[in-house]
Image: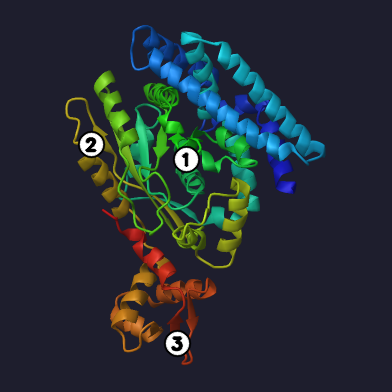
């Protein structure tokens, strides 16, 4: 694939010492956290914790070792099954993977105590820790602007009030700053990354689920400062990766190292994409860890509500399918960009807003209630969502279809009369998009419409609401 060859070329070019020197001297984003130092420091801390009978004792190490060996066993069976009947390069790749896992398992079986902990911590950190390359970020951004111009040009970095972006700019890199965003699409980190950089803000570490690491995404995401978190099953529908004591503690200490070094950090408290369209009740795990960090270090931290809104939601059809049990976690980052760009090329003025809210400071002197604070964060995220024609027009259509003379039928005139102050051009823009996406269709009379897919309209109507 031509795009994949281009990405491979950019990855190689970004390692140029001369280019890295220039970027580190003149660009907003520079090389900050050294991956090797992070892995060494986190592993050292975990071993010290084991030595002083901390969180990770002999029982935790034994449990994690057993889980890893079971996981590798299952993985080997799958890979050997796939290797049967394959030929050529695919067979060679599978055989290499099988050999590597067999060697890993044999090594792990022979280890005990702290040696087991060191081995597993390094194994997990190789997956978790990003390998940010600021030169690749600039190159990738430049190529994306050309190849995916419709989508990239739609992105708007905005602020709730004048001066907020500048205030955040003064904090980022100097204090622990956490960007808290709503989660709509698997591609959310891309408009956020472009938006923050357009506002001349340092790119944060982004928490990305392991479902994103497919195809060429495995090469791209670590270089864009994305940190992989495995939330899926470690042992088939029995134990998740987050049930592995060494894995979860390694992830936690990896985060603490970043925060100690003032690395900005982005995550989605909802955990996964909303299937209803509404903002979900936040999961408090990482926020709880941040509060523990504040209490332990006596440092202040800053939470920045970041509100993301799309004129066209990238996976709206797939999200609706997922409500029926269909798996929608597929495709790599390039495939997503191709689809996004094609979708945004169909319509004019399809803005994607990345809106920054006023930072919320938390100090060691007054740590707030975890649940109340987390809910307040997501309420602020909701309040910062910029209305788009589709977000506004969807509830107008649904309200009118329920109260009008004919169910599931309406006209432009009725929409305009229902809200005379609303811009008629925005109504028309929303209707054009929904018609093209086949959520509605023109009726028999001029200016009239029929609703084809009310569930998809509800998804758009819900985007400015919380589910809690």
Q: Which residue is mark 1?
A: 237
> Which comes before the other along the chain, label 2 or label 1?
1
Whole-percent x and y of residue 351? 47, 60
Does residue 57 sit above or below 195 in this rendering?
above
Report crowding for label 2: few under 14, some 14 to 19, many 20 or more residues within 10 A (C-alpha). some
Q: Which residue is mark 2?
A: 370
Whole-percent x and y of residue 151? 55, 56
Q: Which residue is mark 3?
A: 447
Q: Which mark is residue 10?
A: none
Q: Residue at x 58, y 37 (%)?
A: 137
Q: Residue at x 51, y 19 (%)?
A: 120
Q: Nearer the viewer, residue 356 or 268?
A: 268
Q: Nearer the viewer, residue 63 or 311?
A: 63
> Which comes before the other along the chain, label 3 or label 1?
1
Label 2 residue SS: helix
Whole-percent x and y of residue 341? 59, 57
For residue 437, side relative to residue 63 (left or right)? right
> Which comes before the other along the chain, label 2 or label 3?
2
Label 3 residue SS: loop
């Amino acid at each position: 694939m031509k795009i994949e060859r281009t990405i491979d070329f950019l990855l190689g070019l970004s390692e140029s010492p001369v280019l890295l020197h220039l970027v580190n001297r003149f660009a907003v984003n520079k090389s900050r956290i050294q991956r090797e130092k992070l892995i060494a420091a986190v592993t050292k801390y975990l071993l010290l914790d084991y030595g002083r009978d901390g969180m990770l004792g002999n029982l935790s190490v034994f449990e994690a070792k057993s889980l890893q060996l079971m996981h590798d066993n299952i993985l080997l069976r799958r890979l050997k099954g796939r290797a049967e009947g394959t030929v050529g390069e695919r067979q060679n790749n599978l055989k290499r993977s099988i050999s590597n896992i067999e060697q890993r398992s044999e090594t792990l079986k022979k280890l005990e105590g702290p040696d087991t902990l060191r081995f597993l911590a390094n194994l997990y950190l190789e997956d978790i820790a990003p390998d940010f390359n600021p030169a690749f970020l600039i190159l990738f951004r430049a190529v994306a602007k050309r190849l995916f111009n419709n989508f990239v040009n739609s992105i708007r970095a905005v602020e709730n009030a004048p001066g907020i972006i500048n205030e955040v700019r003064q904090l980022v890199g100097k204090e622990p700053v956490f960007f808290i965003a709503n989660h709509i699409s698997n591609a959310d980190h891309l408009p956020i990354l472009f938006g923050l950089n357009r506002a001349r803000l340092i790119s944060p570490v982004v928490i990305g689920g392991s479902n994103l690491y497919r195809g060429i995404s495995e090469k791209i995401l670590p270089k864009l400062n994305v940190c992989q978190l495995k939330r899926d099953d470690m042992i088939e529908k029995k134990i998740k990766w987050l049930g592995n004591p060494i894995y979860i503690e390694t992830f936690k200490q990896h985060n603490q190292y970043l925060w100690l070094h003032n690395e900005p950090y982005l995550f989605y408290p909802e955990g996964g994409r909303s299937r209803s369209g509404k903002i979900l009740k936040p999961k408090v795990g990482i926020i709880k860890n941040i509060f523990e960090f504040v209490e332990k270090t006596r440092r202040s931290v800053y939470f920045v509500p970041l509100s993301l809104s799309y004129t066209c939601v990238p996976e709206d059809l797939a999200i609706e399918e997922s409500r029926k049990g269909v798996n929608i976690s597929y495709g790599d980052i390039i495939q997503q960009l191709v689809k996004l760009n094609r979708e945004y090329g169909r319509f004019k003025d399809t803005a994607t807003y990345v809106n920054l809210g006023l930072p919320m400071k938390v100090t060691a002197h007054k740590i707030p209630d975890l649940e109340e604070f987390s809910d307040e964060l997501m309420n602020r995220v909701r309040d910062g969502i910029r209305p788009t024609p589709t977000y506004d027009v969807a509830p107008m259509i649904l309200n009118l279809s329920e109260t009008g003379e004919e169910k599931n039928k309406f006209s432009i005139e009725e929409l305009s009369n229902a809200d005379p102050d609303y811009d008629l051009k925005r109504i028309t823009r929303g209707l054009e998009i929904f018609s093209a996406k086949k959520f509605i269709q023109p009726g028999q009379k001029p200016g009239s419409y029929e609703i084809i897919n009310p569930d998809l309209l509800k998804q758009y109507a819900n985007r400015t609401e919380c589910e809690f």
